[in-house]
């Protein structure tokens, strides 16, 4: 068997020659966190999250699937937990599955009217992101929050809407507890 292009997904890792890795550092997340002063005071090189992805077909292909592993590190910007940028899909009706494999956090889901739903993430929880729904992972724990994800290869990512108006609710540390505000 030819193992050159084999992809392995175990022990919280996605490995193999076809796997891509992107890293998001504090300096890449301008405008995402609320507390600007706290944001300016963090080392811009601090790693907030990374995504490993396996894209077996060309981006935009109808009928294909992509697979990803997102790892959000523990940390705070002011009182706001480290989280992913969050996005709608460019083909806005496209859905996605996420499942948590490590750590504790929140999957924040927001529909187009700005209604927000927070789903607790812990190892084994499964999260369905319907179409027309922005999604973001928030690490409220003290270890890495890791989740697998699978989405259609023609979904694309629309970061603009979130950059413009954000999520209507945020997950903050209040009195030592994760609180939706
Ligand atoms: C793909 C998807 C995930 C995220 C990843 C990083 O549609 O939802 O693979 O891309 O969790 O989050 P963003 O893309 O919001 O920086
Ligand atoms: Zn997505």
Image (cartoon, grey):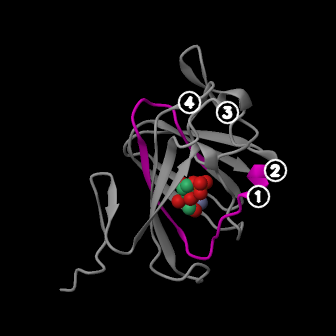
Would you name the residue on which mark 2 appears?
164
Residue 157 in magenta? yes
- Up/down of 100 relative to 3, above or below: above
User: Is there a contact, CB below 8 Å, between mark 2 and mark 1?
Assistant: yes
Q: Quadrant of the C terminus?
A: top right
- Image mark for residue 160: 1
Q: State which region is magenta.
A: 136-163
Percent of width and height locating residue 135? 63, 51
Q: Earlier in the sequence, mark 3 or mark 1?
A: 3
Give me the C-alpha separation between circle 2 and circle 1. Answer: 6 Å
Give me the C-alpha separation between circle 2 and circle 3. Answer: 20 Å
Would you name the residue on which mark 3 appears?
40
- Up/down of 174 relative to 22, above or below: above
Decide if ligand 1 comes within 8 Å of the CB at mark 3: no
Q: Earlier in the sequence, mark 2 or mark 4?
A: 4
Give me the C-alpha separation between circle 4 and circle 1. Answer: 23 Å
- Up/down of 34 relative to 84, above or below: above
- Up/down of 136 relative to 8, above or below: above
Q: Residues within 10 Å of mark 2 (few under 14, many from 20)?
A: few
Farthest bottom residue in view: 1
Q: Earlier in the sequence, mark 4 or mark 1?
A: 4
- SS assignment at label 2: helix
Give me the C-alpha separation between circle 3 and circle 1. Answer: 22 Å
Q: Residues within 10 Å of mark 4 (few under 14, many from 20)?
A: some
- Image mark for residue 76: 4
Q: Residues within 10 Å of mark 3 (few under 14, many from 20)?
A: few
Q: Residue at x 71, y 58 (%)?
A: 159
The mark closer to the camera, 4 or 3, is: 3
Percent of width and height locating residue 110? 70, 47
Relative horizontal placement of residue 77, taking residue 4 as reference (left or right):
right
């Amino acid at each position: 068997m030819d193992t050159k292009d084999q992809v392995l997904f175990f022990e919280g890792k996605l490995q193999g020659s076809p796997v891509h890795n992107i890293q998001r550092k504090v300096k890449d997340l301008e405008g995402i966190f609320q507390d600007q002063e706290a944001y300016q005071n963090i080392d811009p090189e601090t790693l907030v999250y990374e995504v490993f992805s396996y894209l077996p077909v060309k981006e935009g292909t109808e009928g294909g699937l992509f697979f990803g592993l997102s790892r959000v590190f523990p940390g705070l910007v002011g009182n706001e937990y480290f989280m992913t940028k969050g996005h709608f899909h460019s083909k806005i009706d496209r859905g996605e599955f996420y499942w948590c494999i490590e750590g504790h956090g929140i999957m924040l889901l927001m529909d187009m009217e700005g209604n927000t739903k927070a789903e607790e993430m812990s190892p084994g929880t499964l999260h369905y992101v319907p179409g027309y729904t922005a999604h973001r992972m928030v690490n409220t724990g003290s270890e890495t929050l890791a989740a697998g994800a699978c989405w259609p290869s023609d979904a694309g990512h629309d970061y603009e809407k979130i950059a413009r108006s954000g999520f209507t609710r945020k997950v903050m540390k209040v009195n030592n507890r994760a609180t939706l505000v």
